[in-house]
Amino acid sequence: MATILTVDDSASMRQMVSFTLKGAGHTVTEAADGVQALAIAKRQSFDLVITDVNMPNMDGISLIRELRTLPAFRFTPLLMLTTESGADKKQQGKAAGATGWIVKPFNPDQLVKTVQKVLG
């Protein structure tokens, strides 16, 4: 199964995502914002990163932009999981290198299916 980094400033959201993905057999590491996630990503590679957009210190779009500059994350699937659903935000995410976009609240089955799809 995959190693997944999930990034969200909401502890309850991180717990829900982590619970869902661990239930599907994945290994999950959590980060509370983009700065913490980037520090973890520089020490460890992951098969997938799922990040919120709106977070303190470093938002998800900036995080994706930074991750894409790291050789280990050049081709890693990077998903946005956010309440933002506007076309302009999605375009910003895509331009930064996001692989896909999931709108909160998420359906656990849909999250697992999306993860399986992007992991191939």
Image (cartoon, helix red, strand yellow):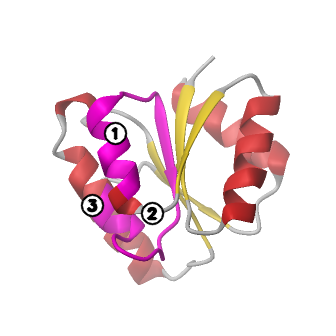
Q: Is residue 38 magenta?
A: yes
User: To which residue does mark 1 refer?
Assistant: 41
99 displayed left or right of 67: right
Q: Residue at x 26, y 37 (%)?
A: 42
Can you tell which mark lies on residue 62?
none
Q: For the residue marked with disc 1, what is the amino acid?
A: Ala
Q: For the residue marked with disc 2, what is the amino acid?
A: Asp
Where are the magenta residues, as a range?
36-63
Q: For the residue marked with disc 3, what is the amino acid?
A: Ala
Secondary structure of the residue carrying numbered label 3: helix
Secondary structure of the residue carrying numbered label 1: helix
Q: Quadrant of the C terminus?
A: top right
User: To which residue does mark 3 refer?
Assistant: 96
Image quarter of residue 35: bottom left
The tag earlier along the polypeptide, 1 or 2, is 2
120 displayed left or right of 104: left
Residue 22: x and y, percent?
75, 31
Residue 84: x and y, percent?
56, 78
Residue 16: x and y, percent?
78, 53
Label 3 or label 2, whichever lies nearer to me, is 2
Q: Report the Cα–Cα distance between label 1 and label 2.
A: 12 Å
User: To which residue does mark 2 refer?
Assistant: 33
Q: Is 24 in front, or is 35?
A: 35
The crowd level at tag 2 (other Cα within 10 Å; few <14, some 14-19, many 20+) is many
Question: On screen, 76 above or below 106?
Answer: above
Residues marked 1 and 3 touching at CB (< 8 Å): no
